[in-house]
Image (cartoon, rainbow, N blue to C red):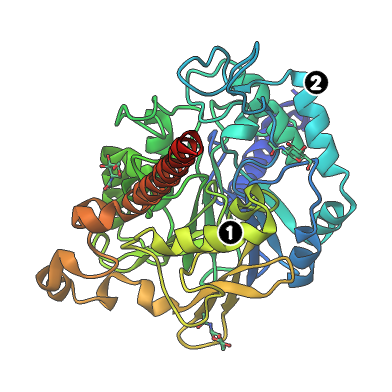
Amino acid sequence: MGGANWLRWPWWLGVVIVGAVIGTRFVCGGGGSANASRYEEALVSRIAFGSCANQTAPQPIWSAITKFNPQVFIWMGDNIYGDIKRPLKLFGKERTIGPWKNVPRFVPASEQEMKSKYNIIKNNPDYSRLRQIAKVIGTWDDHDYGLNDAGKEFPAKVTNQRLLLDFLDEPQDSPRRKQAGVYTSYTFGPVGRQIKIILLDTRYHRDPLSSDGSILGSTQWTWLEKELKGPSSAITIIVSSIQVISNLSATTGPLFSMESWGRFPKERGRLFKLIADSKRDGVFFISGDVHFGEITRYDCTVGYPLYDITSSGLTQAVEKVVPTPLHFMVIFLAWLTPSTMRVMGPNCRFRSCTYGQQNFGAVEIDWDASPVAMKIEVRDTDGILVTGVNISLSELQAHSMNSTATSKVGKDQRHCSLEVSLPWIVRYRLAIFLYCFVAVLLAALVGVTFVAVSVFTLCLRKCKLD
Ligand SMILES: *[C@@H]1O[C@H](CO)[C@@H](O)[C@H](O)[C@H]1NC(C)=O
Ligand SMILES: *[C@@H]1O[C@H](CO)[C@@H](O)[C@H](O)[C@H]1NC(C)=O
Ligand SMILES: *[C@@H]1O[C@H](CO)[C@@H](O)[C@H](O)[C@H]1NC(C)=O
């Protein structure tokens, strides 16, 4: 036993390992568990976000986004259109609509095809420029998950998770690559001025539509509860690929329906209850999916207004589906569709306060204002506001609204009553209008035919008489 024996014992190795573990915990702000939050200390005051980007369509939106100069950019899903869309065909060998439809409208692409679609967007020079100036993070929706409206039953989800994480430059050893689903969280900024961004996965564990089952699945729920009840942050942004507050389907039925948390009322109630129970202030949602932009707000659930800023259509926007001279029709129909949650204001581009052309979302925070002030906007391809709100952070605190007052004024006020509780004549006015319109057209057609036939027979008779 020499005096230098201690050197042979690897106790110092223990110190190094313990030191490294403590260091990692400190840097990551949460430890090495599978879903640890990532942490970066630089102050963040500009965040951009968007969804629904067709990789082969022109993408002029990127230059508007880089001009906004965000520090963080968030992909909210449909980052590529990975699945293959067959053309609408009523007749022929492959019929994609009608009661005699014999093939599905959407089919999954191969792994190779998915990869090359991601490569197209990653090689876009304007998007590359954005990657140089901003930290790019994201989640997915159905078309990059691999199939329109797909949920937990979709078999290619494991492969496609890897492809999305490759696209987002997720490190090879990241725990996010080993978990089931792409949910994760980030915290940016120094203590006191932190922004937590929680990215949900609304696909990997989602039960069938109209099952009123789960969207997140039990493991993700446990994780989310830990995230929301964990260390506080000045601002918490919850990213959901589908809308959380608006329940568009309630007012567009029976014409068409959209995916949303509203279609899973139990799951939606659980989300609001979790936010309320966590006593977390400064929470708002951002969402995509619907191919237009709007801001909605729900006042009667967590003690302060819960905003949902929807930006959809980095390239895929509703007005693209009709020729330019008919854009007024889309704007008119958007105006006609009732909404109890939409934030209206004089600054909107259109009266409806929705925007059906290409757009992105922008959050700007003035940390030096007292109280801290936020500008949350949806902007067009020139970077100009189409709908927006100015919120002071003190409005997003549980004591900011008198809860007994709101419960008394109650369910009829704007931003409080659900779409489903609208009087039926208001709730279904879009369908009523369209059915009436078609009825009038048909009646006119019948009338014109009747007159034509009458005139013809009259002539015929007259000719015979002569
Ligand atoms: C994407 O854009 C291309 C080119 O404009 C178009 O041919 C294709 O149909 C679009 N894909 C989808 C899913 O809309
Ligand atoms: C949303 O609308 C659908 C369709 O009308 C309805 O079944 C569902 O209960 C609504 N959800 C909420 C939260 O109102
Ligand atoms: C927000 O405030 C700015 C001034 O700081 C103003 O120019 C802008 O119009 C406001 N936006 C909205 C949506 O009211």
Type of the residue with mark 2: Gln
As helix, strand or loop, the secondary structure at mark 2 comes to helix
In the drawing, what numbered circle is on residue 356? Answer: 1
| Lower position in the chain sequence, tag 1 or tag 2 | 2
As helix, strand or loop, the secondary structure at mark 1 comes to loop
Binning the other alpha carbons within 10 Å of mark 2 as few (below 14), some (14 to 19) or many (20 upward) gives few
Q: Is residue 176 visible?
A: no
Taking the spot 66% from the left edge, 24% from the top edge, the residue there is: 86
Horizontal and vertical percent for residue 377? 57, 71
Q: Would residue 221 appear left or right of 59 to someone viewing this image? A: left
Horizontal and vertical percent for residue 204? 51, 28
Image quadrant where one finds the N terminus: top right
Q: Would residue 232 appear left or right of 192 to someone viewing this image? A: left
Ligand 1 falls in quadrant: top right
Quarter of image, res 211: top left
Q: Front-most of 51 and 442? A: 442
How far separated are the C-alphas under marks 1 and 2?
Answer: 32 Å
Type of the residue with mark 1: Gly
Taking the spot 59% from the left edge, 17% from the top edge, the residue there is: 95
Q: Would residue 195 appear left or right of 278 to someone viewing this image? A: right
Horizontal and vertical percent for residue 188? 61, 61
Q: Front-most of 372 and 158? A: 158
**In the rendered view, would you say 89 is above or below 247?**
above
In the drawing, what numbered circle is on residue 346? Answer: none
Q: Is residue 318 visible?
A: yes
Which one is in front in this view, the residue at disc 1 or the one at disc 2? 1
- Say whether mark 2 is within 8 Å of ligand 1: no
Direction left: furthest residue = 408
Q: Front-most of 161 and 231? A: 161
Q: Mark 2 points at which residue?
A: 112
Quarter of image, res 182: top right
Taking the spot 62% from the left edge, 39% from the top edge, the residue there is: 18
